[in-house]
Structure formats: structure tokens, C-alpha cells
Image (tube, helix red, strand yellow):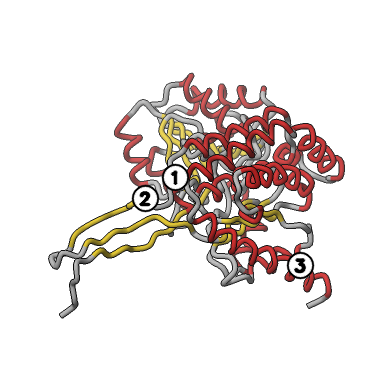
Amino acid sequence: MNALADEATRLLQSAARDAREAAHVLSVAPRPQKDAALLAAAAALRARIAEVLEANAQDLAAATGLTPAFRDRLALTPARVEAMAKGIEEVAALPDPVGRVLAEWTRPNGLVMRRVAQPIGVVGMIYESRPNVTADAGALCLKAGSAVILRGGSESLRSALAIHACMAQGLREAGLPDACVSVAPTADRGFVAAMLRAAGLIDLIVPRGGKGLVTRVMEEARVPVLAHAEGLCHSYVHAAADHAMARSLVANAKMRRTGVCGATETLLIDAAIAPALLPAIVADLRALGCDFRADERARAVCPDLPAATEEDFRTEWLDAILSVKVVEGVDDALDHIRRYGSEHTEAIVTQDEAAARRFLDRLGSAVGMWNASTQFCDGGEFGFGAEIGIATGRLHARGPVGLEQLCTYRYQVLGTGQTRP
């Protein structure tokens, strides 16, 4: 291990030890104290918006060679800072998830069994480019009673530190330790490696970023991981879709923000409706600056569409590009999603309730939608206030990860003197 790696490990271990001490305090903090910290942090974001935007401007100026979608994820505006502040306030308004009785039952011998929600402990958050994750993850972990160590991408370090200063101000005003929410003090990649090896110091790692980041975390982590690999989302326009609704939904699902993980990357459209509707959808999206990759049957309807390769249907574009395929009904659409999708979010557009139910019931993805844009796959839109990420695995949590998903549980057994025979 070289000197830089040694220093990164030292910094991580110090931060993790402080976080563990802070987590102990936070785990028993009453709701009013946690909410006071959150509300003070939101107020600090508004009061210090100039500092946050200046830090972000420096990050943007230093970043070179980024795609437009990546720069969009990195960029902050007054509206986005206000959205962060509101998100923190929404988290404060939510019920406290800690201490909830999840289940209770009485055994024949009179023992009362309770399953009670408790904090995870120390969460390590590794993310790329999105400065707002600093506020979202910090707020959610704080309310859920867990300390969090945040390690954003090097391109967003100044922004993350400026936002964290507001979170720390809120913690101090509420009398909670600064280490309840901490940001990696270095952009050294060795800090990430140290986080992944920190079993016993960090209880859960949450990666949020591109496929390369998530793959590295999954391969190297010695700490439990809650992750999603990609947001390869599909919008399926069924033969019984309302044409105007389909055009509106597909345009929003693809082009509202192309760089978010809930953006539709592939359009599936029934053969029965494609000749009448696909040209209009293509025209709508082209007017918004979208490009396409289409299979042979789609190109038979719209001959000027570029041909799609097999790999195109496996690609999370995160850009103004849409893959297009003509399918034969619900089961054919589901087969395509199972083969190419990432189990993130899929939508069906139809006025046929039986077709919608078949699609939703047989879909394996974390989130299925009926007559709604895939871009609603977001913790704020689900009423979670914010999200720490979207989980697509099969264990513990799926879909937007909010307060409830950031808790584990323990059992309490209440007796009246019972002994086991």
C-alpha cells in the first residue's frame, strides 16, 4: 500500500469511528431534535445559496470532456437548490421510522413478540456527479437514525462540501454531532477502496452512479451493498393506448431529463398501432432533439430511422437517444424486457385494464407503471421526501429507497416469567 492509499485509509477509518460514535447518539435522538436539524439545514441552504452556486460553478469550470447529460447532472441552479431545501423539509415532515412496531404477536405461552424498526448504523454513500445526493442522502440517513459518510465524485467535490456545510450547520444548531453527516475530505480514489474494506466500521454501502462504479463496488466490497446496476427503462405502448396520451407520456419519459436513471431508454410499440402512431411519436421526439435506433419492423414504418444493433437494446443511453422495437402484444414486450432490461422501471400505456394487469403482474422489475411516465420513479414523487437511490436487487429493498428502507429491525420479547421446558 502506497503513502496515498495509507493516508486515504487513515482518513476513512477516522471518519468511520467518528460516524459510529455519532450514530449511537443519533439512534436515540428524539424526532423533534432530528427534525430541528433538518429544518435548520434547509434554512442554511437557502441562506447560503450563493456559496453553493459558486462552488458548483467552480466544479463545472474545472470539469472537461463531460457529456451534456453528465454536465446536466452536475449543474446546480437556484431552482435545484430550492428543490434540495424543500426535499429536506419534506423528510422532516415525514413520520419517524425508528422504533415503529412492524409486527406483534402473542405465543401460546403468553410471550409477546415484537419486530421493531431500528437504524442501520453507519451508511457509506458513494455517488457520481449529482451534488443533490449530498442533501438527499444526508437528510434521509439523519431522519432514519443512521450516520452517513458521503463520497461524491471528484468532479462535484466543491459542491458537495458547500452543501455539507449547510447540513453541518443544521446539526450543530440542533445539538447533534457533526459526524452524523460527513463528506470525504479527499477526492483520492483510495478513500473509496477503504470504504469498501471497512467491515465493522461501515454497515451498508450504497453506490449511486454509472455501471462502472456500481460494478466496482459490487466486486470489491467487503461490506453489504444496496445497489442498482443501470436504469434501462422501457415504455410499452399497447394496441389499446390512447394516442394523445401515448405521445405525451413517451416524450416526457424520454426527454424531460435524459440523464436520470428513470428516463425511458427503449420504446416498445405494438405492431397493431405502430403504423398509425409511431410516426407521430418520432416527430414529437425529433422536435425535442431526440435521435433513434430502431429495429427492422419500426424502420418499415419509419424508413429514415437509423438501424438498431443488438447492443443498442442493452444500452442505458442517458442521452437524447431512444431505442425502438415493434412487438406483438404484452407477452412479447415482457420477453424483451426480461432479456434486455435492468429491472428498474417499466411502463405500459393502454386503456385496456386486463392488458395492464397482465403486464404489471408478470413484470419482474422493481417498479411497474400504468399510464404514467417512467420518470416518476423518484423518491420525492413516491412521497418519500427524497431517495438515497433506486434498488433493483431482490433483497431488503426495491425501487426508491426512502426512510423505511433505511431501517433494519430487531426483536423484543416481552414475558411474565416464562421459562422454557
Residue appearing at x 53%, y 27% in the figure: 278
Amino acid type at image mark 1? Asp
**Residue 78: horizontal and vertical position, in percent?**
72, 28
**Quadrant showing the C terminus:** bottom left
Q: Check disc 3 and give the amino acid type.
A: Ala
Task: Identify the residue under disc 2.
Answer: 100
Whether residue 348 is visible to the viewer of this picture, yes or no, is yes
Q: Mark 3 to mark 2: distance in Å? A: 38 Å
Q: Are marks 1 and 2 in contact (CB under 8 Å)?
A: yes
- In this picture, is 247 found above or below 266? above
- Residue at 32 percent across and 58 percent down: it is 115
Q: Is residue 389 at least partly visible in the picture?
A: no
Image coordinates of residue 122 in percent, x first then y, are 56, 61
Mark earlier in primary sequence (3, 1): 3
Residue of label 1: 96
Tell me the mark number nearer the camera, choosing from 3 and 1: 1
Which residue is at a point 52% across and 35% down the rendered structure image?
A: 90
| Mark nearer the N terminus (3 vs 2) | 3
- What amino acid is found at the position of numbered circle 2 in the picture? Arg
Q: Is residue 1 left or right of residue 395?
A: right
Which of the two residues, 206 or 324, is positioned nearer the viewer here? Answer: 206
